[in-house]
Amino acid sequence: NGIESVTELKNLRPTDLIKGGLPLGKISELCGAAGVGKTQVCMQLCVNVQIPEVFGGLGAKAIYIDTEGSFMSNRVVEIFNATGNLLKQNFNLNNRNELIKHNFTIDKILSNIFYYRCVDHVQLLACFNNIKILMEKHPQIKLVVIDSLAYPFRFVDFKDSNSMTMKTNILNNIMSISYELINKYNIAILVTNQMTTRITRDVMSNLSSSNLVPALGETWAHSANLRILLSWKNSKRQASVCKSSYLPDTSIFYKITERGFED
Ligand code: GTP
């Protein structure tokens, strides 16, 4: 598609769905219900983005903005080990020395994930202003994850018009900084989002999954260039492209194992 991307490994693909990985220079959204695997994908991509160029990766760094407190370094270690094994297998390496030679070690992986914990919308905006400075120092950063964008807004009552305006302004500010970073550094931004109930006239009498829409409303809805919905279908996990200017709407089944996100 002429779009560079955060490289995927043979046999360990976040999905075949997005044809080569998460696009650089775009905002992607991963939405779905609680527990569907959004954080797992985010952690895996923080490892994948660091795969050395010699093994077909970007050899880059990542920023992880954690608003839910769900990032687990132990899980990153597990995913790193599995990724190392796949690289060994795919490149016929006898041992891990070749990976170590190219700095693909757990110490490097963890120290190349710049982690921010934000508990509310004010900290989230401050964090976005801070990462502008961080990225000047670390232009090797190619992935920024926000897990999740909607969560910090959940506990504030944004019902009156003043607070609604404040919420819209904060989201607009975050989007404007995101596009500034994308234009300057050609990074991939991945945002996770919850599902919420669409308020329609008949919603109370007919609550069904079709009434579930990604949270944050119209302001945000137009900002993501790629939207992937994670869901369950007949007790299998399913990932679907539901908004893209360069991919058809398709779905695949996936699993989450100790090795991470697999098809
Ligand atoms: P919310 O943050 O609540 O919105 O959920 P989420 O969509 O981010 O889900 P998350 O990524 O936390 O994934 C949760 C699911 O991943 C669980 O139901 C488990 O099935 C699976 N999972 C989480 N941790 C592990 C792990 O260490 N090993 C394996 N095999 N599966 C895990």
Image (tube, rainbow, N blue to C red):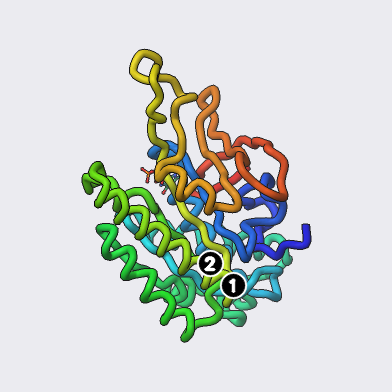
In the rendered image, the quadrant that contains the N terminus is bottom right
- The answer to whether the residue labelled 2 contacts the one labelled 1, judged by CB atoms less than 8 Å apart, is yes
Instruction: Report the amino acid beneath label 2.
Output: Tyr
Q: Residue 11 placed where, x, y %? A: 67, 51
Q: Nearer the viewer, residue 4 or 124?
A: 124
Q: Quadrant of residue 147?
A: bottom left
Image height check: is 235 above or below 206?
below
Q: Residue 170 placed where, x, y %? A: 35, 60
Determine if residue 223 is in view: yes
Left/right placement of residue 66 relative to residue 36 reads left
Left/right placement of residue 167 relative to residue 63 reads left
Badge 2: few (under 14), some or many (20 or more) residues near its Cα, within 10 Å? some
Left/right placement of residue 118 relative to residue 38 reads left
Q: Residue at x 49, y 70 (%)?
A: 62
Most extreme residue toward the top is 205
Kindly identify which residue carries mark 2.
179
Determine if residue 96 is in view: no
Instruction: Report the amino acid beneath label 1.
Output: Asn
Q: Residue at x 36, y 13 (%)?
A: 205
